[in-house]
């Protein structure tokens, strides 16, 4: 069944009425892209720092560092000192044996010489012992310095790895937030960053007061950018609604809506699979007219019809918004073969009259038919300015369902 409507974009008009002080700022895609880039830089820096720390640890653990060489030299000196002490102890022991072995017939000169040799040997042994103790202390000092350096380098590597993990987690979170923001227009809640702007106006012209079932009705959708700033991409929105004059329910399934496609020079059916072509861009002060038509099946009974229109925009910096949803011209549906009504004017119905664009607002192309600088770009075009803008087309299907569900229920029809 053909859906007789171009579902409109996410509806900031139906955003919850929250005090501004309680509304949390939702970062734009541009802000999230900046945060993701900063997180990537921090991660890259952390990876580089970790690599440098690991290289430093490898150097510290090698046998050629100054500390390693100092420890090696201290150990060699300690070995030499131990050898010298052993020799000095041997000499002292021999001198002591000579003294102890003197006979009772030894002369005083022999006894003096032996005692002198023993004293000298014992002094040498004591000095060798002190030298060995000093050498051993230097070994411990050198080993401690070497070990401290290796432990410090290992600790620095552990800390660097922790920083890298934290940076990776931050980068992953930033990337996920950015990806979610780029995808979020498809059914996402952008009510806190998308704004309703009354200076972006939309109007339908050419809708007759009576539409005869089975006959085509040509009309025009006009969007005017009176905001003073260029909109990078604007998505038109049109809804044709039909209710029976008695009873409840909806006759929307009998409505077939089409729009003219300048890119293919053909009429395109407007349904959930084929959205309105985007206007890229819509310059400040410019307006664009979109040719459209609809037909109500010849089998339709007498009924009441209504229209609703809006314009939704997305910018490459992630900002977005829409015109206030406007209730356009109402019409009567006459059975097939009846006399058609007169074409309607350019003043929409409820809520409040919106007159046609001011005379100083110019067509974007210099002609009412369509833009030159701003072209009607087909949905899905590779030339669209950003993924966020690309996603807006799909957002028309999901994000606006709630808005028109409310509108339809108010009209007493089924959705």
Image (cartoon, helix red, strand yellow):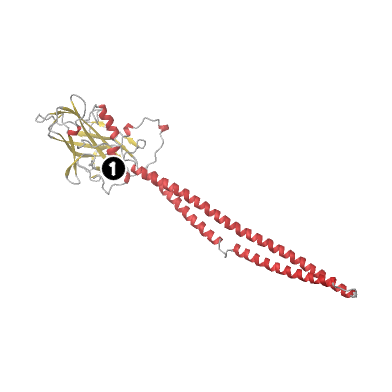
Q: Which residue is mark 1?
A: 233
Specify few, some or many for label 1: CA neighbours under 10 Å numbering under 14, 14-19, or 20 or more: many
Q: Foreground residue, 410 or 311?
A: 410
Which quadrant is the C terminus positioned in? top left
Residue at 54 percent of width and 61 percent of height: 59
- Using residue 138 as the reference point, say whether residue 214 is left or right of it: left
Residue 11 % position (x, y): 31, 34
Which quadrant is the N terminus positioned in? top left
Residue 44 % position (x, y): 44, 53
Residue at 53 percent of width and 60 percent of height: 58
Residue 159 % position (x, y): 52, 51
Residue at 28 percent of width and 42 percent of height: 233
| Occupied quadrant, residue 266 | top left
Residue sitting at the far top = 246
- Using residue 261 as the reference point, say whether residue 150 is left or right of it: right
Residue at 52 percent of width and 54 percent of height: 157
Residue sitting at the far left = 337
Residue 409 % position (x, y): 26, 28
Residue 348 to residue 113: above or below: above
Residue 186 to residue 51: above or below: above
Q: Is residue 176 visible?
A: yes
Identify the secondary structure beneath mark 1.
Answer: strand
Q: Is residue 283 visible?
A: no
| Occupied quadrant, residue 316 | top left
């Amino acid at each position: 069944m053909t859906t007789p409507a171009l579902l409109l974009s996410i509806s900031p008009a139906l955003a919850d009425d929250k005090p501004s002080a309680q509304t949390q700022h939702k970062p734009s895609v541009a802000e999230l892209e900046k945060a993701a880039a900063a997180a990537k830089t921090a991660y890259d820096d952390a990876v580089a720092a970790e690599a440098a720390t690991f290289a430093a640890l490898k150097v510290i653990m090698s046998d050629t560092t100054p500390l390693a060489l100092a420890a090696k030299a201290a150990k060699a000196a300690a070995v030499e000192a131990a050898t010298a002490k052993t020799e000095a102890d041997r000499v002292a022991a021999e001198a002591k044996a000579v003294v102890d072995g003197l006979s009772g017939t030894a002369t005083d000169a022999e006894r003096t010489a032996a005692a002198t040799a023993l004293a000298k040997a014992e002094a040498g042994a004591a000095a060798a012992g002190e030298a060995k103790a000093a050498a051993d202390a230097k070994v411990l000092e050198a080993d401690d310095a070497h070990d401290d350096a290796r432990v410090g380098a290992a600790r620095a590597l552990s800390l660097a790895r922790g920083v890298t993990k934290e940076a990776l987690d931050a980068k992953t979170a930033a990337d996920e937030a950015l990806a979610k923001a780029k995808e979020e227009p498809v059914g996402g809640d952008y009510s806190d960053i998308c704004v309703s702007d009354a200076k972006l106006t939309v109007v339908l012209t050419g809708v007759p007061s009576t539409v005869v079932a089975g006959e085509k009705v040509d009309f025009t959708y006009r969007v005017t950018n009176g905001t003073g700033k260029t909109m990078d991409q604007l998505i038109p929105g049109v809804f044709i609604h039909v209710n029976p004059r008695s009873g409840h329910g909806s006759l929307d399934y009998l409505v077939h809506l089409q729009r003219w496609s300048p890119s293919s020079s053909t009429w395109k059916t407007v349904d959930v699979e084929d959205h309105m072509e985007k206007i890229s861009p819509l310059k400040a002060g410019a307006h664009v007219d979109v040719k459209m038509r609809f037909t109500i099946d010849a089998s339709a009974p007498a009924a009441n019809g209504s229209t609703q229109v809006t314009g939704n925009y997305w910018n490459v910096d992630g900002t977005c918004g829409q015109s206030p949803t406007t209730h356009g011209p109402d019409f009567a549906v006459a059975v097939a073969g009846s006399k058609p009504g007169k074409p309607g004017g350019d003043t929409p119905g409820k809520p409040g009259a919106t007159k046609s664009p001011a005379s100083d607002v110019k067509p974007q192309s210099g002609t009412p038919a369509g833009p030159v600088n701003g072209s009607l770009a087909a949905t899905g075009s590779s030339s669209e300015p950003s993924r966020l803008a690309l996603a807006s087309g799909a957002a028309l299907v999901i994000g606006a369902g709630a808005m028109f569900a409310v509108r339809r229920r108010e009209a007493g029809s089924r959705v």
